[in-house]
Image: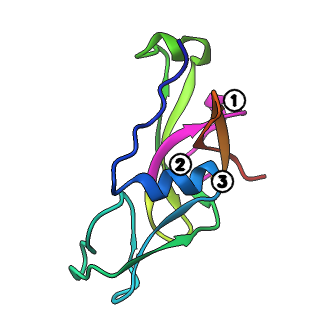
Amino acid sequence: MGKPIPEATFLTAPFWEYVQQKTLCVQKCNSCEEYIFYPKAWCPTCMNMELDWVELSGRGEVLSFTIVHQASMESYSGDVPYVLAIIKLEEGPQLMANIITCDPYQIEIGMKVKVVYEDRKGFQVPQFTLNE
């Protein structure tokens, strides 16, 4: 059994459709210009319902992280130890993802990262790697 594949809802479907094209997009309010992630039906800042999907740079920095030593699912057991991090993107939104292709013990708060895409049986999932 492989790693889980996220299930899209009517609100998250556009996010996952962009990710399948290896493009990182989030919502942006047409009124207050706030970036919004996790997808919502209206802007949590000004309550405007006119939201667009905009492409982000895919660059950010490590805001917080943990090194996982015991996999919560069998499908992750081959990855331990691995990094689960909160990434603050250059544009402001934060998201949780793994930091891959690096030594987990070298990760530090504030390190620069960039988005990469992990293929899970034909389904792309955004992850991050060090932006050197």
92 vs 6, nearest the viewer: 6
Tell me what residue is drawn at x 58 percent, y 52 percent. Answer: 19
The magenta span reads: 95-111
Q: Residue 117, relative to residue 59: is it above or below?
A: above
Q: Is disc 1 surrounded by few (<14), some (14 to 19) or many (20+) residues within 10 Å?
A: few
- Picture disc at residue 9: none
Estimate the x, y position of residue 118 in percent, counting from the top left: 65, 36
> Looking at the image, which residue sits at the far left?
47
Colouring scheme applied when the structure was drawn: rainbow
Which amino acid is tagged 3? Gln
Tell me what residue is drawn at x 34 percent, y 57 percent. Answer: 11
Circles 3 and 1 in contact, beta carbons < 8 Å: no
Which amino acid is tagged 2? Ile
Q: CA distance from mark 1 to mark 2?
A: 14 Å
Q: Which residue is mark 2?
A: 109
Let me know if residue 59 is in the magenta part: no
Which of marks 2 and 3 precedes in the sequence? 3
Which of marks 2 and 1 precedes in the sequence? 1
Observer-side mark, 3 or 2, equals 3
> Looking at the image, which residue sits at the far right?
132
Tell me what residue is drawn at x 51 percent, y 41 percent. Answer: 97
User: Does any portion of residue 110 appear in the rendered image?
Assistant: no
Q: Quadrant of residue 123?
A: top right
Q: Is disc 2 surrounded by few (<14), some (14 to 19) or many (20+) residues within 10 Å?
A: few
Observer-side mark, 3 or 1, equals 3
Which of marks 1 and 3 precedes in the sequence? 3
Q: Which residue is mark 3?
A: 21
